[in-house]
Image (cartoon, rainbow, N blue to C red):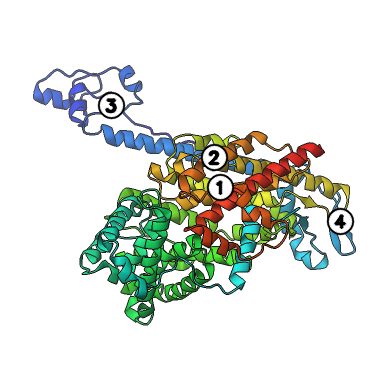
Amino acid sequence: MRVIFVSKQYHNPCAACKFIRKKCVRTNGDTDDCDRCIEKDIKCATESDSSDSSDNNFHITEDGGKEVKAWCATIDQLNSEIDAVEAELEESMVQAKRQASVEWKLSLINGTLQLETPILSMEELFMFTQASIRYLSPFSGLFIQQPVRFQCRSISISLGLASKVQRKELINARRNRTFMLDYNKEFTKLSALFDHRIVVNGLVMLYLEQYIPFTGFLHVPTFLEHYYSLDDPMDSALVMAVCTDALFTLLHKIHYTPHEVRMFADLFYTRCRDLLFDMYDDPKQKLNVVLVTSFIQKYVADVRLNELEANRRVTVALLICADLAQCREKMTLVEWVLFQRSYFRLKVSNLSYTFIHDDKFDITIPEALQIMDVLDDEPEITKGSIRMTGEIIRFTGSPYIPFLLGKVTNIFDGKSCDILFEDIARFELAIKGCWNRLPAIYRICDDPFDPDGYKLVQGKVAPHHLLPFTILHLVTGLITSSILQPHVMPTFRNSAVAETIQVVKTRLRSLALTSCKVLVHALNENWVPSAGQHLPFFGLTAMRYCLYCMEQLACCEDFEFPTELLHLLKKRVDNKSKSLLPDGHELALSSALLYNYRGGPCHGSAFEIYDNMYPLPGFALFSDVFVSSLNNVANRQLKMSYSS
């Protein structure tokens, strides 16, 4: 079916009528002069048919050319959309015919439904799953659905072991940090050493210039109005929170040593904490409590590694968010926008904590975050960032993704997990469906699982446009690399099931390798703070997940490990560590606690050791993860090569 624009014309208009875009009327017939030319006493010159037909009967004039071009473009777009729909419909019909022609033999043994016909591809497995849902669901109570068991050889250093150490720290009561300042005792003495107004003003202005345009966590005019109204910036909890966040977020933009950063950060955080105590009891300060907590939680959790204190504050702030979400009509648009963005940050922080402490992935999207609003006076880069954040929320909030992530958390800890065939079969189609629902500006390719997709991140793609593609492969890499070791359960061991599992294994390895390549090549200049990017911790997190994928691929016995990818990853990690980690926080293998922790319990508190040796212990933990995990992957790869 095609849309065709037809221009009806009973005779060729004369040049004069055509120029003024008036109807050419010939009362005396087509061969005579038109009425207008006779009235004006001018020569009636008619253009040839060929000149009109060569341009589809359109003569674009100055006052109508743009409109006609726009109509033609719209028609072309409609035609392409119709072609796409027809192609999709044709493909669906072909698939339906194929499904109708495929037969599978099943048997019911001891209450367990077993497949007797081998499945030869992931497409056929998906067809079988759909047929099972359609025809067998009414009888699901009559037989047992047998899942596939996925196993892991050992605990993952990059995710499982680091989380295990953090769980141990959360269980034990932890004393205050060595570098933690008592504000009431130390501030007077510290004030004599520096002018805090100069430090605060420098951090605030740099933060507003380098960080806020990419995140939108503050409305600059509103914040500056508040900031300039203060007699002393140390009396504002929000200003103190901003300075605390700026010190480690813009670590490579400021000219302080790591010890100076820790000293200032603890000073500002302690002052902010004291002000927060009074704000909790004031109903009018609810929004400020949420904003302040969203700015300080990453410093407490990720830099000082005090997850317990960070989670207490985040939990209280989330309870306040639940109340504020019901008071939309009482807020101004600026207040609502800032509330949404702070609410999002707190949800992400809480998700990280529940993963470490409870092995849960609860990515429930609150109603207040379903649509992320923007302000008219915000820069375009801020608007684009917020719209992208909204799309990522919708992507990761799909029920299917947290369901699978919750299943594979056992693999992080070196345990096994059980997943049904039907949940595995629809993984690729579910992820592609989420990808296709993204706006076209973020879909940098048609097929996100194209084996050559890693080449896209090597080009000059804007970081904000690349981020959804990278996050898709973060999720894919986490899930597929976790379930690379499927095993046939004894209750349904037969050749058909074994062949089906081999098909699943082959496809999962292909997806895991594709995602791993994308993540390795994504560790490029797009994430370096010196390039104006605001995501240093995202770069560190991406490396951590990438190392996890490599760890799992290195465990596959009948798989040719991509050695060149390991060398490239090591080179990328070395470069990223230098650009993202502060001076003096790059650990050698001999001092890596996690690598030595593999063989047994670590004497003393690992984080106490970090805290006593490094002013910014969170960065030391990241470095430990990279060094230990890289060495572990290299050792596994060597063992596999020797055994083969």
- Tags 4 and 2 touching, CB below 8 Å: no
Q: Secondary structure at mark 4?
A: helix
* 13, above or below 530, in the image: above
**Mark 1 packing: few (<14 Cα in 10 Å), some, or many (20+)?**
many
Amino acid at pointer 2 = Arg
Q: CA distance from mark 4 to mark 1?
A: 39 Å
Whether residue 231 can be seen here:
yes
Q: Which residue is mark 3?
A: 59
> Which of pointers 2 and 3 lies earlier in the amino acid sequence?
3
What is the x, y in percent for residue 121?
74, 42
Q: Which residue is mark 4?
A: 492
Q: Secondary structure at mark 1?
A: helix
Amino acid at pointer 1 = Met
> Which of pointers 1 and 2 lies earlier in the amino acid sequence?
1
Q: CA distance from mark 2 to mark 3?
A: 58 Å
> Which of pointers 4 and 1 lies earlier in the amino acid sequence?
4
Q: Residue at x 29, y 69 (%)?
A: 234
Q: Which residue is mark 1?
A: 543
**Mark 2 packing: few (<14 Cα in 10 Å), some, or many (20+)?**
some
* 549, above or below 261, in the image: above
Nearer the observer: mark 4 or 3; the answer is 4
Nearer the observer: mark 2 or 3; the answer is 2
* 6, above or below 280, in the image: above
| Dot label at residue 572 | 2
- Tags 1 and 2 touching, CB below 8 Å: yes
Q: Quadrant of residue 156?
A: bottom right
